[in-house]
Image: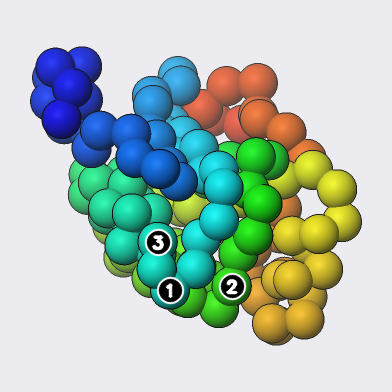
């Protein structure tokens, strides 16, 4: 882990994810491919991001190249964990690819994607 990650209690960046604080929420930036071979790399970041009470997590999928059902499973687990702790997990994406995947998998209602970042961590209603 990098000293910055240790200081903030966040995992070090890896080949498909990195986490940073942005206002009152945590941003997990996802890039490259998330599949059965790399799902644990993403899960590490989402587990850390949902560890606190009332987590407000944004998962930035704008640099994602590929996501399969194992990646969707990781997102579902993290979203459930965030809700259990009184928080939320939202997806940020551009273009039709991720919404199309969410619709096909029946998860679009669970993860209505945001087109960009809220202006501050308090934007939007808590569910």
Q: Find the distance from the CA under tag 2 to the CA under tag 1.
A: 8 Å
* Dots 3, 1 in contact, CB < 8 A: yes
Q: Which mark is residue 98?
A: none
Residue shown at 18%/22% (left/top)? 2
Residue 86, image quadrant:
bottom left
* Dots 2, 1 in contact, CB < 8 A: yes
Q: Secondary structure at mark 1?
A: loop
Residue 70 falls left or right of residue 114 = left
Q: Secondary structure at mark 2?
A: loop
Q: Secondary structure at mark 3?
A: loop
Q: Find the distance from the CA under tag 3 to the CA under tag 2.
A: 10 Å
Residue 100 falls left or right of residue 90 = right
Residue 14 falls left or right of residue 53 = right
- Name the residue tied to disc 3: 38
- Name the residue tied to disc 1: 36
On the image, the x and y values in percent for residue 18 come to: 39, 35
- Name the residue tied to disc 2: 68
Q: Quadrant of the N terminus?
A: top left
């Amino acid at each position: 882990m990098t000293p910055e990650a240790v200081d903030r209690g966040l995992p070090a960046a890896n080949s498909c994810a990195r986490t940073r604080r942005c206002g009152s929420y945590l941003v997990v930036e996802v890039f490259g491919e998330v599949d059965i071979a790399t799902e644990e790399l993403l899960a590490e970041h989402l587990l850390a991001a949902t560890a606190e009470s009332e987590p407000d997590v944004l998962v930035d999928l704008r640099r994602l190249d590929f996501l399969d059902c194992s990646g969707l499973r990781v997102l579902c687990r993290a979203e459930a964990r965030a809700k259990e702790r009184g928080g939320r997990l939202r997806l940020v994406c551009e273009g039709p690819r991720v919404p199309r995947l969410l619709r096909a998998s029946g998860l679009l209602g669970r993860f209505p994607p945001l087109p960009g970042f809220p202006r501050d961590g308090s934007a939007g209603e808590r569910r």
